Amino acid sequence: MKRHFTATAFLVRGDATLLHWHRRLGQWMPPGGHIEEDEDPVQAVLREILEETGIVAEVIENAARHPFPYPEQLPAPYTILVEDIPGPGERHKHIDMIYFCRPLEGVDPLPVDDPTLLWVSERELQSECLLDAAGCGVSAAVPEDVRQLALAAITAARQTSIR
């Protein structure tokens, strides 16, 4: 089975993370997508955030870097998931590098006018409530993996200083 490398961002602002309603998959998901040729995972995740939300962001680093200047070090993903991706087209798997991110200081919290984007609060995630997909006429729970990672991202953002 083919495998594609992807990068996904749990974008945190305060006590909320940004999710979007993925119409084809029929579920709430964080921004993310395929890592393009000549792109590293961090470049990919920041590009995907910008393309899907219009927000300029940064990665929340979860591990210390080693003190050598070369070779370059990238922030490590929080985790890596291997996901089965259904059609259309050929079934395949995503090797998905999960990053926790936050908008750069002073950035508009949602410059893109997209009714399928929703800041979901920690309280809503903890209560496992149904979220309305604006403009879609659908209410759905956040998938359990997305819910748990979103809560972890909010906690990680709270525990790290902005600069």
Image (cartoon, rainbow, N blue to C red):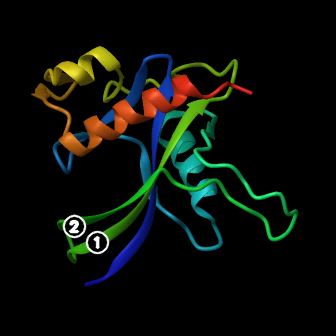
Where's residue 7, x and y in %?
47, 56
Give the CA distance from mark 1 to mark 2.
5 Å
Which amino acid, mark 2?
A: Asp
Q: Which mark is residue 93?
A: 1
- Going by the image, does 80 lie left or right of 159? left
Q: How would you rate the neighbour count of disc 2 (Cα within 10 Å): few for under 14, some for 14-19, many for 20 or more?
A: few
Question: Pointers 1 and 2 in contact (CB under 8 A)?
Answer: yes
- Residue 91, picture quadrant: bottom left
Q: Earlier in the sequence, mark 1 or mark 2?
A: 2
* Residue 134 in sight in this render: no
Above or below 11: residue 87? below
Closer to us: 26 or 98: 98
Where's residue 149, x and y in %?
34, 40
Above or below 114: residue 43? below
- Going by the image, does 75 lie left or right of 23? right
- Going by the image, does 45 lie left or right of 97? right
Q: How would you rate the neighbour count of disc 1 (Cα within 10 Å): few for under 14, some for 14-19, many for 20 or more?
A: some
- Going by the image, does 51 lie left or right of 117? right
Above or below 36: residue 129? above
- Residue 118, picture quadrant: top left
What residue is shown with label 2?
84
- Residue 121, picture quadrant: top left
* Rendered residue at 53%/28% (across/down): 157
Closer to us: 34 or 144: 144
Which amino acid, mark 1?
A: Lys
* Rendered residue at 65%/22% (across/down): 107
Q: Secondary structure at mark 1?
A: strand
